[in-house]
Image (tube, rainbow, N blue to C red):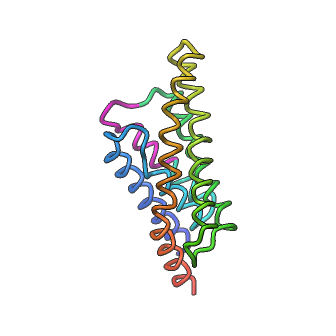
């Protein structure tokens, strides 16, 4: 029972971080460190807590966005898209070594950031283009803006690695 409460608390805290980081990044179009928070949750606690952090955090963000809430189909696509980031984090836990800041980890984090942004935007941009028509011009324009997210994730993921390394060590200390 205690581990369920810990997991729920961790998901709630990280989902709140997703909301806060998204709120502060509203002025930096498509640059959002929240992807890394969802990724870190997946890496630290597994796929379901990672997916939970992403879904809850992005639901809150999309619902209470200062620019207005997302239409329902777009909201669902955002939640499905961010779920892949939690899943990628869980898969990354097998590949990333939490002890070193070597070229291997930096390259992997950059690659995971690219995949995270790509998976998210492939889903969201198709739904966005379908909703707001004309489909192909809207999709192509959206994909160009998606490059901002993909490139920024490629920078943010390795940049925040020291925080991830700290969290991995704390998790190991708690488990021991």
State the residue in front, 96 or 128: 96
- Quarter holding the C terminus is bottom right
Tell me where residue 156 appears, x and y as whole percent: 47, 55
Relative image position of residue 3 (x, y in whole percent): 55, 73
Q: Main secondary structure of the magenta part?
A: helix
Q: Quadrant of the N terminus?
A: bottom right
Q: Which quadrant holds residue 98?
A: bottom right
> In the picture shown, does residue 135 fall above or below 113?
above
Find out whether residue 15 is within the magenta segment.
no
Q: Residue furthest top?
A: 134
User: Residue shown at 57%/19% (left/top)?
Assistant: 130
Query: What residue is drawn where x is 48% and y is 60%?
Result: 11
Identify which residue is drawn at 42% across, 47% down.
Answer: 32
Q: Position of residue 108 (x, y in %)?
A: 63, 60
Q: Is residue 175 above or below residue 55?
A: below
Q: Is residue 60 magenta?
A: yes
**In the figure, 100 relative to 114: above or below?**
below
Q: Nearer the viewer, residue 150 or 127?
A: 150
**Magenta span:** 55-69
Quadrant for residue 139, please give it: top right
Residue 106 in the image, given as x and y percentages of width and height: 57, 63
Total numbered circles: 0
Please indicate whether residue 84 sits to the left or right of residue 168 in the image. Answer: right
Work out whether residue 153 or residue 20 is closer to the camera in this orientation and state it.
Answer: 153
- Whether 110 is drawn above or below 64: the answer is below
Query: For the point 65% across and 62% down, which residue is it?
Result: 92
Looking at this rendering, what residue extends furthest in the front direction?
A: 103
């Amino acid at each position: 029972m205690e581990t369920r409460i810990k997991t729920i608390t961790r998901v709630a805290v990280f989902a709140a971080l997703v909301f806060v980081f998204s709120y502060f990044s509203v002025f930096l179009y498509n640059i959002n460190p929240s992807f890394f928070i969802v990724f870190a949750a997946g890496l630290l606690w597994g796929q379901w807590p990672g997916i939970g952090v992403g879904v809850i955090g992005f639901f809150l963000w999309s619902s209470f966005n200062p620019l207005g809430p997302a239409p329902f189909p777009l909201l669902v696509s955002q939640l499905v898209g961010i779920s892949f980031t939690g899943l990628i984090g869980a898969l990354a836990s097998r590949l990333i070594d939490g002890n070193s800041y070597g070229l291997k980890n930096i390259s992997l984090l950059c690659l995971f950031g690219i995949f995270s942004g790509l998976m998210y935007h492939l889903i969201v941009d198709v739904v966005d283009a379908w909703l707001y028509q004309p489909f192909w011009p809207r999709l192509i324009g959206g994909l160009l803006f998606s490059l901002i997210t993909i490139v920024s994730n490629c920078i943010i993921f390795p940049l925040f690695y020291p925080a991830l390394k700290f969290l991995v060590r704390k998790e190991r200390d708690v488990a021991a």
